[in-house]
Each structure stands twice: as structure tokens, then as C-alpha cells.
């Protein structure tokens, strides 16, 4: 019997232990999913919406319980952990509301003697692999629209956040979703790869590392199934000379440090017009120094630990290398007693005198550090923003919205912002370019990845 242990970053204790599914249990889940989906696909959209909406009701009713579990599993401060339940609700209800329009048949113009239209057909069984950093919101991006589209779902959650998968199951079971339409499995990496390869899987949604996305592509190769891969980023922000710094600084710095920097679309690189560079840096450093690193179960804590000590040590290494290469570190780690090598707790850091030869400016950090560089003009900013293997989001801060939009059009990213960052609007397509992945979730466009078109060409007798 293989046991999966979840080590809490809060205090290093074992918070959850779960038995991993053996091959027999996986086989039974796949068979249940296939059988359930045959009936579910014929269920009316109104009934699907009713059950999914009731599931959301049941889920958000446990907000406080879920928030505390989230804090212990992955370390987000309890003061803001409940916000993810609100984000879950917004995304779920938005996708439920737009399903009718997104899944409606496409009716073509009349042609004498013929009836012609295109329907959106469910794919079958969707295997969804979700991460720990925003465990409810990333999972719901795929789970609810997949079910609304008539698919069955098998969810494998991160080993760091196994209770999140169980809470989905609890809510769906509570409202009477037919057995087999939604299931969760706790799986080893090898078992997850075997599920991707299984012929009964028609769609895979994966959120995680580039290496994990490559694993999905390798195991799905040759079966021509739909895959959606959201693989993170090294997202940039550009601060133009015309900004209101009172608004730009807290906006972009929160985008860099929320969730201890553990956000796929968090800001990891900032480019500031040289005329306001010193002022911006002074304000940014002051903003970071007011963060309180501490035990995330304490409501006063504003910066929690990273997910595990190895993640914190990875970021420490990036910072140390940058400083050795000439970067200036503005924050004294000694001011944060909890921050020490081998600990999941890491002092926040702001770096200047950095360049793109440093890992901290081109390799995903996923931690509470940001590098800031001066630029002479918009063209230099665009060149540096696009100088990345990633392309999930990018942000431009400016009072000149027309210029900001023009700059945004030149940026190589799936989502571009002006005057905000680190945000996901479920009515917009969530997608990336380059090593940030492929495919699309959310929005009406997202439903296209969870269905296939079927054309009806009917000649009248």
C-alpha cells in the first residue's frame, strides 16, 4: 500500500496522509466515468446547470473550513485564504451562465432543400491535473465547464493539496451529481502518466511545470486527443513615465508578492522608465518592507511560507547568484528571523542592477522576489518584456490608455493588461504562448476545447 504524505509548510508536520489509488481502483474509476458520461451527455443543459450551481452553493457554504485547510496545506495567510473561495465561485458561476450560448448549435443561412447546422459534442472523459498554488481556482477552470459541456471528469490534485479534490467530491456528492460524472483519484506520477495514456481519456487539462506539460504531451502523443497546458510564466510589467505612482506601486508590487510570489501570472520582472526609476524603487522597497513574514494561521501575517523548503532554497539560490553577479539587494534578510536556509520561510527581496544574464530575470522564480530594471523608452521595454521563454501575461502601467493598448499589442503574452496585473477574468480566454503552454480555458472560447464540432448536412427528401 503506497501512502502519500502532505507536509505542511506552516510547521513541517504531516498534515494529511492518503492511500494512493492502485491499478484496480484506477480501472474502476475509468469504467465508471465512461459509463456515466454516456448518460450525462444526454442530460439537459438546464439540469447540468442546476446541479453545478447547487454544487457551488454547497462549496462556498464551507468557506471558513476550506480556507483554514488551504492555509495548512500550502501556506497562504489565513487573512486572505478565503478569497480563493470567492474566486472559485465567480469562475464557476460565470462558466455556468455562459454555457448555453457557448454550446448552442451554430445555425447556418437557409439553403433551398437543405438543413445545415453545427453542434458542440462532448469529448468524453476529461482528466484534470491541478496544482497546489491556487488549488480551487485552477481546478474549477476546467472541472465545471467540462461537466457543463457533457463530459465526465477525473480530477488528480497535487500531493500538496489532496483535500481540495476531496472537497470537490464532497460538494458534488452532496447535491446528487450522478455517480461517475465527477471522481477524484490520489495518484503517483507513474499512475497519472498511465491515465493520460489510457484510450478512455479524451481530454487532459494540466496546470503546472513545463516539465509536467512535456510529460502530458509525451504520453498523449499519437492519440490525437485534446490537451490544455498552463505552464507558468516569468511575467513582466512596464511602468511608463506618466503613471500615478501612488496607484502603480501597490498594484504591481501586490502582483509580485501575493501568495508569496507563487502565482503563474504573478509579476516577476519590472521595467521602469529611467526618469522615475529611483522614485519607483524607493516606494516599492517601502511597500515590501511593510510585509509581515510569519505563521500563516496568524491573521496578522501578510507573507506566508513557500510551499516547501526546497522551493524557498531555490529562490534563495537565484538571489545569491544575482547579488554575486552585481545585483543590489534592498532587503536585509536578517530582519526576518524565520527566513533561514532549509526553511520554507523566505524573506521578500527587491533587486536592482540586474540584467537578463541572471537566472532571477529569465528563470521562473515562483517566490517573493522581483528584479527591477530601468528603460529608456517604450521600445526598450517591449524588447525586454518579450525576451523570455514564457508568455502568460504582461502588464503596462500608464495614464495614456491608447499608447498602453498599442504597447500591449506588441507583447508576446496570452493576456495583456493596462494598469492591473495578476488577475484572471473568467469571461476572457486564459491562454499562454511559448513555454507558458497551449490551449485555452475559461470564456466562451474555452468551451471549444472541451467539445468537438459536429456538422449536420441534411438534404430534404
Image (spheres, grey):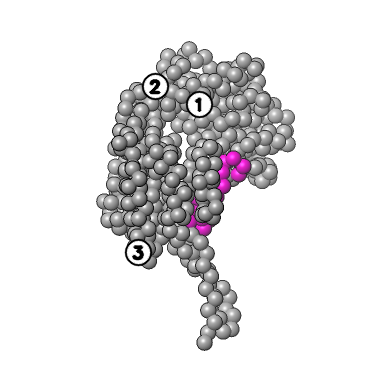
Per the image, label 1 sits on a secondary structure element best described as loop
Report which quarter residue 175 is drawn in.
bottom left
Region of the chain picked out in magenta, as a range: 433-450
- Is the residue under label 1 in contact with that under label 3 (CB below 8 Å)? no
Q: At 54% from the left edge and 41% from the top edge, which residue is drawn?
A: 214
Residue 187, how many percent across, how many down?
38, 41
Q: N-terminal of the two: label 3 or label 2?
A: 3
Q: Is residue 172 left or right of residue 260?
A: left
Residue beneath the point at 56% across and 22% down: 318
Residue drawn at x 33%, y 39% is: 20
> Relative to residue 116, is residue 51 drawn left or right?
left
Give coordinates of residue 460: x percent, y percent.
53, 84
Q: What residue is pinned by disc 1?
A: 368
Q: Which residue is mark 3?
A: 39
Q: Earlier in the sequence, mark 3 or mark 1?
A: 3
Q: Is residue 444 magenta?
A: yes
Q: CA distance from mark 1 to mark 2?
A: 14 Å
> CB under 8 Å between callouts 1 and 2?
no
The residue beneath circle 2 is 294
Q: Name the spot of residue 94 as percent of width and height, x first.
A: 43, 53
Mark 3 or mark 1: which is in front?
A: 3
Q: Is residue 228 left or right of residue 28?
A: right
Amino acid at each position: 500500500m503506497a501512502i502519500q504524505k502532505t507536509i505542511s509548510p506552516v510547521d513541517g508536520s504531516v498534515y494529511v496522509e492518503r492511500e494512493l489509488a492502485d491499478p484496480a481502483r484506477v480501472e474502476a474509476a475509468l469504467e465508471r466515468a465512461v459509463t456515466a458520461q454516456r448518460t450525462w451527455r444526454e442530460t439537459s443543459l438546464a439540469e447540468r446547470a442546476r446541479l453545478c450551481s447547487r454544487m457551488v452553493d454547497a462549496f462556498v457554504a464551507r468557506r471558513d473550513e476550506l480556507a483554514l485547510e488551504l492555509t495548512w496545506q500550502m501556506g497562504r495567510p489565513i487573512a486572505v485564504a478565503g478569497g480563493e473561495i470567492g474566486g472559485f465561485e465567480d469562475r464557476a458561476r460565470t462558466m455556468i451562465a455562459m454555457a448555453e450560448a457557448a454550446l448552442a448549435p451554430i445555425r447556418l443561412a437557409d439553403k433551398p432543400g437543405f438543413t445545415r447546422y453545427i453542434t458542440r459534442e462532448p469529448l468524453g472523459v476529461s482528466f484534470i491535473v491541478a496544482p497546489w498554488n491556487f488549488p480551487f481556482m485552477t481546478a474549477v477552470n476546467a472541472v465545471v465547464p467540462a461537466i457543463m459541456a457533457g463530459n465526465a471528469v477525473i480530477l488528480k490534485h497535487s500531493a500538496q493539496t489532496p483535500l481540495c479534490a476531496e472537497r470537490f467530491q464532497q460538494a458534488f456528492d452532496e447535491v446528487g451529481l450522478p455517480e461517475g460524472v465527477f471522481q477524484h483519484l490520489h495518484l503517483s506520477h507513474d499512475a497519472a502518466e498511465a491515465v493520460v495514456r489510457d484510450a478512455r481519456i479524451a481530454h487532459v487539462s494540466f496546470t503546472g511545470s513545463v516539465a509536467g506539460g512535456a510529460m502530458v504531451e509525451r504520453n498523449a502523443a499519437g492519440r490525437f486527443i485534446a490537451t490544455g497546458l498552463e505552464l507558468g510564466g516569468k511575467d513582466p510589467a512596464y511602468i511608463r513615465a506618466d503613471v500615478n505612482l501612488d496607484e502603480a506601486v501597490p498594484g504591481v508590487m501586490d502582483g509580485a508578492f501575493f501568495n508569496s510570489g507563487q502565482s503563474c501570472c504573478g509579476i516577476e520582472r519590472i521595467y521602469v522608465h529611467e526618469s522615475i526609476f529611483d522614485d519607483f524603487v524607493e516606494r516599492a522597497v517601502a511597500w515590501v518592507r511593510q510585509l509581515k513574514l510569519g505563521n500563516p494561521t496568524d491573521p496578522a501575517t501578510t507573507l506566508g511560507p513557500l510551499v516547501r523548503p526546497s522551493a524557498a532554497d531555490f529562490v534563495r539560490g537565484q538571489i545569491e547568484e544575482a547579488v554575486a553577479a552585481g545585483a543590489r539587494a534592498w532587503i536585509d534578510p536578517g530582519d526576518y528571523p524565520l527566513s533561514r536556509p532549509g526553511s520554507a520561510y523566505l524573506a521578500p527581496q527587491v533587486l536592482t542592477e540586474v540584467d537578463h544574464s541572471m537566472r532571477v530575470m529569465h528563470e521562473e522564480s515562483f517566490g517573493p522576489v522581483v528584479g527591477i530594471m530601468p528603460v529608456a523608452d517604450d521600445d526598450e521595454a517591449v524588447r525586454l518584456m518579450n525576451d523570455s521563454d514564457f508568455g502568460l501575461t504582461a502588464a503596462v502601467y500608464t495614464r495614456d490608455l491608447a499608447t498602453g493598448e498599442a504597447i500591449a499589442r506588441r507583447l508576446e503574452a496570452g493576456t495583456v493588461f493596462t494598469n492591473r496585473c495578476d488577475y484572471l477574468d473568467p469571461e476572457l480566454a486564459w491562454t499562454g504562448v511559448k513555454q507558458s503552454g497551449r490551449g485555452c480555458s475559461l470564456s466562451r472560447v474555452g468551451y471549444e476545447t472541451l467539445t468537438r464540432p459536429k456538422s449536420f448536412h441534411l438534404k430534404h427528401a
